[in-house]
Image (tube, helix red, strand yellow):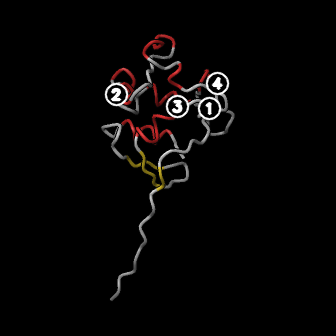
């Protein structure tokens, strides 16, 4: 399940194909990549709420003046200074995702602010072994 931490880890990964780790809402370790798991969160319709347009339908270079200057069309633009600024913690993207904003400016009708979005793959925990004397 994707959290803001998933998007943050993707932005800090270094490339759109680099595998990153993140902790999901159940405190489980997961892995993903921007190309395989995060890009679709911004591009696909009906991800954040049923019937909503993909984020990039408004958050693109052509409409940046009307969409909080957030161009979410590619990894390179997403990780640029214009979207992230100097770091993820102070970025507009983080602030908007934490506020629970979804397509068309409507908040999702769930207690956590955003619906649970499935992305990434859970990493199997290594089995602990007891050393033999």
Say which residue appears at 44% left-offset and 64% top-offset.
125
> Is residue 83 shown left or right of residue 47?
left
- Disc 4: CA contacts within 10 A as few (<14), some (14-19) or many (>=20): few
Give the label on residue 97, or none.
3
Identify the residue under disc 4. Answer: 106
Kindly report the distance in space between the C-alpha atoms of the residues bearing marks 3 and 1.
Answer: 16 Å
> Is residue 122 shown left or right of residue 46?
left
Comparing 73 with 92, the one in front is 73
Give the label on residue 46, or none.
1
Instruction: Check disc 3 and report its element: helix, strand or loop.
Output: helix
Task: Give residue 101's quadrant in the image.
Answer: top right
Kindly report the distance in space between the C-alpha atoms of the residues bearing marks 1 and 4.
Answer: 13 Å
Identify the residue under disc 2. Answer: 76
Q: Are marks 2 and 4 in contact (CB under 8 Å)?
A: no
The numbered mark, 1 or 2, whose residue comes first in the sequence reads 1
Please tell me whether mark 3 or mark 1 is closer to you in this view.
1
Say which residue appears at 43% left-offset and 25% top-offset.
73
Instruction: Check disc 1 and report its element: helix, strand or loop.
Output: loop
Is 47 rendered above or below residue 31?
above
Instruction: Check disc 4 and report its element: helix, strand or loop.
Output: loop
Q: Are marks 3 and 1 in contact (CB under 8 Å)?
A: no
Say which residue appears at 64% left-offset and 24% top-offset.
106
The numbered mark, 2 or 3, whose residue comes first in the sequence reads 2
Q: Are marks 1 and 4 in contact (CB under 8 Å)?
A: no
Kindly report the distance in space between the C-alpha atoms of the residues bearing marks 2 and 3.
Answer: 19 Å
Is 125 rendered above or below residue 24?
below
Instruction: Check disc 2 and report its element: helix, strand or loop.
Output: helix
Locate residue 91, reporting x and y percent: 41, 27
Please tell me whether mark 2 or mark 3 is closer to you in this view.
2
> Is residue 131 shown left or right of residue 98?
left
């Amino acid at each position: 399940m994707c959290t803001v931490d998933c998007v943050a880890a993707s932005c800090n990964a270094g490339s759109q194909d680099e595998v990153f780790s993140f902790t999901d809402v159940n405190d489980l370790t997961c892995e993903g990549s921007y190309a395989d798991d995060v890009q679709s969160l911004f591009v696909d319709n009906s991800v954040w709420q049923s019937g909503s347009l993909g984020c990039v339908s408004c958050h693109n270079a052509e409409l940046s003046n009307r969409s909080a200057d957030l161009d979410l069309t590619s990894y390179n633009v997403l990780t640029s200074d214009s979207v992230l600024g100097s770091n993820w913690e102070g970025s507009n993207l983080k602030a908007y995702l934490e506020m629970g904003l979804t397509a068309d400016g409507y908040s999702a009708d769930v207690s956590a602010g955003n619906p649970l979005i499935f992305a990434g793959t859970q990493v199997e925990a290594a089995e602990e072994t007891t050393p033999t004397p």
